[in-house]
Amino acid sequence: MDESELPRVLQQMWGIEGRSRPGPKPAFHISDIGRAAIKLADAGGLAAVSMSKVAAELGFTTMSLYRYVDAKDDLYVVMLEHVFSEPPELDPKKPWRDRITTWAEAFHQGLRQHPWILQIPIAEPPLSPNQLTWMESGLQAFAGTPLTPQDRLSAMLLVNIYVRGTAQLTATMATDPDAVAETDRLYTQRLTMLATPDRFPGIAATLEQPPDEGYAGDFDSTEFAFGLGTVLDGIQSLINRRS
Amino acid sequence: MDESELPRVLQQMWGIEGRSRPGPKPAFHISDIGRAAIKLADAGGLAAVSMSKVAAELGFTTMSLYRYVDAKDDLYVVMLEHVFSEPPELDPKKPWRDRITTWAEAFHQGLRQHPWILQIPIAEPPLSPNQLTWMESGLQAFAGTPLTPQDRLSAMLLVNIYVRGTAQLTATMATDPDAVAETDRLYTQRLTMLATPDRFPGIAATLEQPPDEGYAGDFDSTEFAFGLGTVLDGIQSLINRRS
DNA sequence: GCACACTGTGTGCGCCATACACAGACCATA
DNA sequence: TATGGTCTGTGTATGGCGCACACAGTGTGC
């Protein structure tokens, strides 16, 4: 129960002020570190985020960061905390399906704007304020349904996993749409060459009948909604069972 | 169409022998690299896999690996190719639900045995033999259903994503079950402290009514099957729509 | 038998995370 | 108001990493 058990990073993110202490005042706040790191990651991917680069961005020395952050992993936690803005407002009057869809799309958009999020090795479950706010928002999407709290957690995690997963598939970590298209073309070509119909009939079948239209830009809208619909259908059947 | 366009690693994994060439014969095969790297990763996590460690494991110098592998990322590709054995046999007489469940459980088991798989940054879609075999096996699970090839791909990916996602959630990358339980206890305690009912009523609700029984070991069996069932219900409704 | 492509090796570079010792800044207490 | 102790940011140093490059030896096709 003692707050001091919290890691330093979490204490600072929750604004838990220790008693007024001797020594010089800190020159900046941990959120400054987060902002600087996010700026670097947006520009050059997660690989562009190093302690020295972040420190240089702030105008301080590398080692100064360790007064705020215990290790590099903590830096990732801070980045995840600050990269998402507030979750969307969910209209309580709308049906749960609309609400969780809004939530999922907002999450998805965040991941597309900051693809490096998917590269962060997740070592610990979320405990930072903004992350919990998103969790709470996702759970609220199921308000009014007959789902138990555990059901809601499972359902929210299911949608969360789906969004992360699809984003992972599409995000070739490329910012340039041309590069994405080229990568995709090359992949299809190689797959056609390697997945011969005799040994891989199922894969070959998907290749023979290519998707409806232009491919690159369509996934994010059509395919995403299609797969999400399937997931939500599963949740719907759970709701039916609970009624 | 030219096979030489394939990256060297893929050529070696598909056993595409270039014409007999001058120079000394290679001292080992790329699969040896894969085995050595997997051994290191199983023992000490993905962080224990470095070019020099792998080379030392094989009894060669660091730089010798670069005769087989263009970069560290290729090493990951080789590891992913060799870490999974053959996909399970899927009985064509059983219903699709049983088949894809078998497939999902086999995949899940592989991820639990080698948690470091989830840490590998996936830069490219799968093209190696064993990965395609698993893909094909997953697609075959939907044989006999009215799903189109694209539907089957989407459904297979959905299950794939689900398994990866749940494995990600449970795998605190811990091998020691006591450590898992302790981590979970600590997390629940901190969450209880931070997620106050006034600001986070949904989260607090899930905490008030803890899951049925012992928690740690149960997820992998019960909770996994529960979530998978929800996903499959969604696919079932897609099948119904296609009929 | 010879040319040359290919092999594994050794050295070295730049970057990384981070341990540690230090000089100065500031607050609680006297 | 003085001062002790603690916290601040800094400089230096270490061990590890991925990988570029030059090299000497090997074996195949001509």
Image (tube, coloured by chain):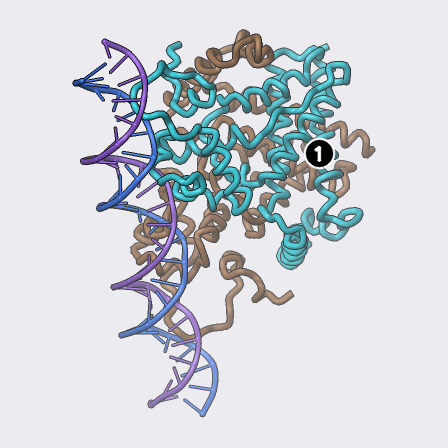
Chain colours: A brown, B cyan, C blue, D purple
Residue B225, by quadrant, is top right
SS state under label 1: helix
Q: Name the residue: 55% across, 42% down.
A: B42
Circle 1 residue: B227
Residue B156, by quadrant, is top right
Residue A204, by quadrant, is top right
Q: Quadrant of the C terminus of chain B?
A: top right
Q: Residues within 10 Å of mark 1 (few under 14, many from 20)?
A: many
Q: Nearer the viewer, residue B27 or B137?
A: B27
Q: Nearer the viewer, residue A16 or A206?
A: A206
Q: Name the residue: 63% across, 11% down.
A: B148
- Is C1 placed left or right of A77 in the picture? left
Q: Chain of mark 1?
A: B
Q: Quadrant of the N terminus of chain B?
A: top left
Q: Nearer the viewer, residue A46 or B35?
A: B35
Q: Amino acid at mark 1?
A: Gly
Q: Nearer the viewer, residue A2 or A26?
A: A2
Q: Give residue A189's position: percent from left, percent from top.
A: 44, 13
Q: Give residue A24's position: percent from left, percent from top.
A: 37, 71
Q: Give residue B146's position: percent from left, percent from top.
A: 70, 10
Q: Name the residue: 45% across, 55% down.
A: A71
Q: Is residue A182 visible?
A: yes
Q: Is residue C14 above or below residue B73?
A: below
- Is A68 placed left or right of A165 in the picture? left
Q: Is residue B198 visible?
A: no
Q: How many marks?
A: 1
Q: Give residue B219's position: percent from left, percent from top.
A: 71, 42
